[in-house]
Structures are given as structure tokens and as C-alpha cells.
Image (cartoon, coloured by chain):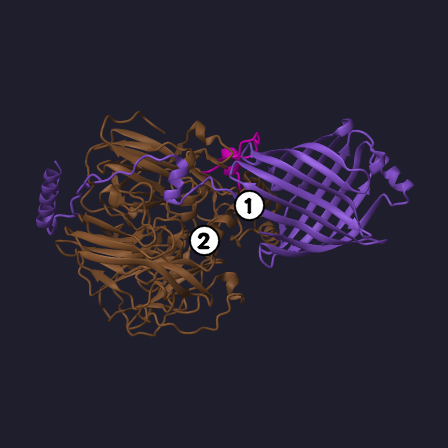
Amino acid sequence: MHVHRRIMALAIALLAAVSARSQSASQHVPPEPPAKTMPDMPYHEMVTVMEMDDTAPIGMVLLDRLEWRGAAGASAGAWNAHAWYGGDYSKLWFKTEGERARGRTEDARAELAWDRIVARWWSLQLGARQDFGAGPPRSWAAMSVQGLAPQWFDIEATLYVGDGGRTAARLQAQCELLFTQRLILQPDLEANLYGKADPERSLGPGLSDLEFGLRLRYEIWREFAPYIGVSWRRAFGQTAEFKRTDGEGIGDARVVAGVRAWF
Amino acid sequence: MNKYRPSPVDPFNAARRRFVQGASCGVLALAATRTFSQTPATAERQTLSGTQFDLEIGPLAVNFTGQRRLASVVNAQLPAPLLRWREGDTITLRVTNRLPVPSSVHWHGIILPADMDGVPGLSFEGIAPGQTFTYRFQVNQAGTYWYHSHSRFQEQTGLYGPIVIEPRAGERHRVDRDYTVLLSDWSDWNPEHLYATLKRQSDYFNFGKRTVGDFFKDVRQMGLRSTLAERRSWGQMRMTDADLADVSGYAYTYLMNGATPTGNWTGLFRRAEKVRLRFINGSSMSIFDVRIPGLRMTVVATDGQDVEPVIVDEFRIGTAEVYDVMVEPAEERPYTIFAQSLDRSGYARGTLAPHPGLQGQIPALDPRPLLTMADMGMGHDMSEGSAVVGIEGMRDMPGMQHGAMPDVTAATVTHAPSEQTPGVDAQLLQARNSLSDPGVGLRDNGRRVLTYADLHTLGGPIDPRPPQRQIELHLTGHMKRFMWSFDGKKFSEAESLRFAHGERLRIILVNDSMMLHPIHLHGMWSEIESPDGAFQVRKHTFLVQPAQRLSYLITADALGRWAYHCHLLFHMEAGMFREVIVASGPVPAREG
């Protein structure tokens, strides 16, 4: 059978060679069947042999803000970072943010979540949050929707359920305006809401605070960008009352300067 | 030719913003003495011919930008030696792997038995470190081809070389000079890091996004309302019209025959000589637009297949494509071979010159093109309840007259349920059937630009039978998540495509994404059809433009397991890959 095919192929090639000068293209000769066939393998074996794996996990650490905040009274240091690890569909997320002033951590939180992409631009996160810093620590279960809204708004909306029947919600939105390919202005807005008062942490029910920031960064590399900006913050409702009682202002504008870095 | 000259180029100087021009001619062949103790100090390009070949894959220290890096190469050369075969010969290639990791060689575009195709996992086990694999097959075709590693990202680090197969009956076109011109993209970045970076921030290498300044410029030019409407459309889709290349000149130095633009590969000629240039795009992630200012090029073949000669000023060469052109320089002066990347972030450059050491004027890069309405197929589905755009919205979209709309023989598109996945960011409403659009950045540029409609393979199709069935596949992906797939299914999620041995079938590709994809089926020819169903051109790799619907015929005469994928290396890695199984038996049920 194979010999026969080979003879046929040779005959065709010869014919082609003879006629090629007057005729046009060479004739096509189908290939011989393979002498050896690779056995079927399960995907995980296959990717090892192929060295090609579209399920391979990737990780990233983003230090979105590591900044100094200058206020009228005292200055503070603040951080906001996240890290993720996983495949295209599911990832493990870690987020943390907080502020330190006068040598102590004022208000800080850390969250761990499982992230699953659920729509073209959106993912769902389920996880837990731990508050620390001033006041007694609080623990929360968290569910958030994170993604890219039309017009390039990065949105993160989270609902929290805590011990003692506490509930909270948080909405964050940010976008980017490019002055050049490296000079980028990033406005962001954050709102926090609570279901009931938590006097030990000086929080009232309803909208407790709003924060609006404008940060102008220069990406020396994409991975490393120093920035300067301003941040406005205002407390509302009973939260504002608590602040007044503590002798703090209910709102302020602060100059910020810091770096954004990732790897 | 490739003598190393020390260079003062600082890779972090201002030129880097535009792209890394390169230090010098390229290969620094001292290197890797452990494995290449007998390596000659100069890397004169080697041509190997005959029927017996010994190839050795190994590391090589190179310096293209002022930074020393390790490449993976064949016979201590980048590109690998030119292999000259003769049609009809049975050839033996003993390939030894001296790398510390597995390797392979795939003979791109060569029709051969499946176990000789060189794809680890499908054709064979790959070549383990220290091992030799013997490839042996009969060569039954002629023309220009190339070979490259099919293991991991070795193609990105230099493992590619040209193949020229001499026709039994002699060359159709007699020429005085014959050069292979292999274009590639070198990066000092580790390719693993390039890929991971795209996964972390897919627009990392894009330095052409529109800015606040561009906004005000557009407002001045077309008014506030129009500008806002246009920005709103793109914002609705959450895409950018500047998404042309995933990796740009920011990380790449574009090479011509292994020489940087500064290194200036030179092909010699005498006045009035006929010169054949065999262009091969051996890059990993780059599409080039090629021209030789002052010379008209006669395209005589593509992907090794002779075509009716067509005269052009410029042609676009997708990753892994091959074009043979002939030129006849009338003057005794240097002519620049200029290959700018699709996103205009850099170029490969060489010179045709009467004497060594001459160089012609280097043209400026064209303005960076933006994707247009034509590339949108007049509208992607913006879904998620946003009724803003759709076809109507796009039609009203102003500022999209960056080029006349090519003839829109639009076809309404239907989508497989598997495309309804978070891994797909756009779905086409209407596709363009036309082959006569030169594509983004080449429309109405004042030059005669080659299109697929100009290409007519001589001798007609290899198989005159009409197709017995057809498969429709969509080229899908998610730009931001850097996920790529066919029909919304990554390789890991997809069943193999099954072809019945001997069947003639039609594949229709619809590009739902906004990027160009060079699609390559191993083992079998792809015979592209014109929009009216006539035979057009035979290719092994072809570009599918955004919003394009392209149909082609295949004769499934090659038994075995074959790779079918986008030849953008990182798209392949991210899932734009399918296995094709050609087996005896009945024609499988209709798919796709």
C-alpha cells in the first residue's frame, strides 16, 4: 500500500517535472501517513509535552498607593495594595489598605477573596475582611462586583456582613485621563456606608464618609510611577458627630505624594 | 557581513521611546563556549544544501541593543542557516538539541508526514536535551519557506531560519541575485516575562493611546458633539482604536536577516540586474508593511506558491507569511528595504546597494494608524444591555473617515453559544467579505498596496472538487484579559476538529476581535476563495483582518494530528490553538 503510494507520488512528481516548464504550478503530492502517531494524552500531560498551557496561573502584586498625606495638623502615611494569583477564570485576591499617623495604624483593613469572571467586563468576588487599627477589630464576610463600566470606569462595589449583625457597603470608582502616554491623571471616588452605628470605631449608620482623590502620576516604567495629588475627605451623619466629639474635623483636603508600583 | 562593532547605544536613551534601534549587526558569536567551542568568531550567514543536514540547537550570546542576552539558535546563527533543498529529493535532517530544555523544529509550510511536522505533543515527543531527532521526508514542493521551533517561546529568542526549495524544472523567473530577507522581532525581555506582562496589563506596550490633547485636537477638527459621540462609542465598547500590536517597538528591536536597523543588512546588486527577494516574517508577534522606496516590486509568489506577477509599491506581511518579490534597480545607488511594524512603533531596515557600506535614505515611519469603522464591521455588539451603539450607533460615528470604506459586501453574522463567555469581549454584527481591503494603516496611503484580491496562484487549486461540508469558526478573544480562542473556547476547553481523510471542506473564519490574526494550518494547504467563491490563492498562513469573513478550502489528504493556530506566539499560548485530526472514516457531523 505504502509502496504503491510512493510509486504514485513519484510518478506524479515526474509528470509534474516534465510538464512544469510549459504548465504552471507543480502538482500537489499528499504526504505519506505518519509512521508513528502520538497517543492521546490528558490535557495536563499534553501541556507538559507541548509546553503550551492556556490555563497556567499568573500572579500580580500592585501597590496602587504608597503615599504621604499632608494635612493641616499632622501628616500621615497610607497604603492601598492588592495582589492576585490564578488563571483566566478564577483568581485568589488579597487587598489591603490603611493609614498610619502619629506612629500608629489608624484605620486599616485586609481582605481575602475568591474572584471569578462572570461577564464580559465583570467579576464576582467572595471573601472575608478584617479591620484593624483604632478601635476593636471587626470581621466581615464580603461579596463584591468588580469590573470595567462603560467609558472606562473601574468600579468596585462591595457588600459586607459582619459579626453582631453589622452590615456595610462600599463603592469605589476610578478612571484615567492620559495627558501623554506616561503622564496620567487618575480621579477616584470612594463612599462607605454602614447599616448601624459602631461607636467604638466612631462610625454612624448610613453614609459615613466620602473620599475624592486626584492623582497625577508619571510612569517612568509602566511598573513604577511616582505621583502627586490631592485628596478630599468628608464624614457625614453620625460619623461626623463622632468626629466632632473627638475634636477632629469632619472634612479636610490633603496633599498626597507617593508611588504606584507593580510587578 | 555580521561583524560585531561595539556600540555606544544606550538602551534607555530617548530613542527607546520610539523603539530600540539596536546596537549593531547583531550576533556576538563568542558565547556559550560550553556548547559551542568551535563556533567561528564571525557569524557569516551559512547556507546548507544537499540532502543530509546536521543542525544543532543551542544557546548563543547576542547583543542587539547594548545588552548581552542569550538567544536560542541553530548552528550558532541567528537566523538559523538557510536550507536549500531540491524538489523531489528525500532529505534527512538530524537535529540535535544542546539546550538545557526540550526543543523542536517545525518545517513551516512543508507538506510532510505528520510525525515529521515537529510539533511536540502532536507530531512527536519533542527533542529532549542532548538528544537527536532525525527528520526524513520527501520534498514535493518548491519555493520559499521557513523553519522554527515549536517549543515554548524559543521562536521569540531566535530559533528560526529560511528554506528555499529549488523547483525540479528550474526557476520560473530567472534572476541575477537571490536573497532571503527574514524579518523578526528581537526582545531583550525574557519572553516569559513579556507574556506574563500582557496578562497583567494587556496595553502595557501600547504607547499610542489617545490623550487629552488628542481630544481637544479632535474637538477643533470635528466639533465637540462629534468628538464626544465618537469617544463614547469606543468607551461603550471599552476598547481602544489604538490596539494594533500587543507587543511594540518599546520591547522589540526589529531585525532583517538578524541585523538591527543600525546593523543594516545589505544585499548587493549591479545596475539593471534582476533581484529576487524572498521575504519571510519569522517574527513572534509582529506584522510588517514592506516597501523599497524608489523601486516597484513584482510579487511572484506567496507562501512558496507562484502567483500571477503583480506590481506593487508595498505589501503587508503577517507573522509567518512569505512573499517573493522581484526588483530591478535602475540606478547605481542604495535602496532602503523598509519594513515598518503595523503599529508604526519601529521598523526593520536593510539596503540593496551596489557596494557594501552604502545606505539609502530611511523614510519616516507612517503616522500611527487608528482602527476605523471598517475594522469594526460597522459595529460590534456592545451588549450588557447598553443599547447605545450597535450598527446604528457606529454608522453615526463621526471621525471615522480615516480612509474610504472598502466595498462592504457585508454578511450578517451568527454566533455559536460557546462565544457567550466572559472570555470574549466583542461579537461582530456584520462581517466584511472583501479581500481587496489592504487593511488598517494602508488604506489610501498614495501607494499601490498589495491585497489578497491581487493574488492569483498559478495553476489553480490542488483539488477541483467543490467542498462537501463547511465549518465556521470565529476568531475570538478578550483584549483586556488577554484571552484568545476560536469560538470562545481556548485550546484547553476545545475538542479537536476532525476532518475525514480525503474530504474537501470549506472553513469560514470570522474575526470577531479587533486584531489581525495570522492563521496557520499545519500539513495542508489553505486555498482562499474570492468573495464570489472562485479560487484565489493558496497559502499556509494568512491574515484575517478585524471584522473580516474569510473562506478557504482544504483537502484533508494528510493523515494524522495537526496544529491549527494563530501564529502570533502569545495568542497561541493564550489559547488560540486547535488540534486538527485527519482520520479515515465517514465525514464527521457538521460542526461550527
- Which residue matches tag 1? A59
A197 shown above or below B78: above
Q: Position of residue A247 (x, y in %)?
A: 91, 45
Q: Colour of chain A?
A: purple
User: Residue B555: where, in percent of width, then height?
Assistant: 23, 36
Residue nearer the viewer, B251 or B430? B251
The region drawn magenta spans: B377-399
The subunit carrying tag 2 is B
The chain assigned the colour brown in the figure is: B
Q: Is residue B242 left or right of residue A96?
A: left
Badge 2 element: helix
Q: Is residue A23 above or below residue A38?
A: below
* Residue displayed at 24% across by 71% down: B270
Q: How many other residues sit within 10 Å of disc 2, few (<14), some (14-19) or many (≥20)?
A: many
Disc 1 crowd, CA 10 A, few/some/many (<14, 14-19, 20+):
some
- Identify the subunit bearing mark 1: A
Instruction: Name which quarter of the figure residue B493 lies in.
Output: top left
Mark yes or no: residue B300 visible: no
Q: What residue is disc 2 on?
A: B191
Q: Are marks 2 and 1 on the same chain?
A: no
Magenta-colored segment: predominant secondary structure: loop
Kind of residue at disc 1: Gly
Q: Is residue B371 magenta?
A: no
Q: Which residue lies at the image location 33% right of the left edge and 48% below the top edge? A: B451
Residue type at numbered disc 2? Pro
Which residue shows up at 18% across the image and 45% down it?
A: B459
Camera-side residue: B287 or B165?
Answer: B165
The picture places residue A19, in percent across and down from the top left corner, at: 9, 48
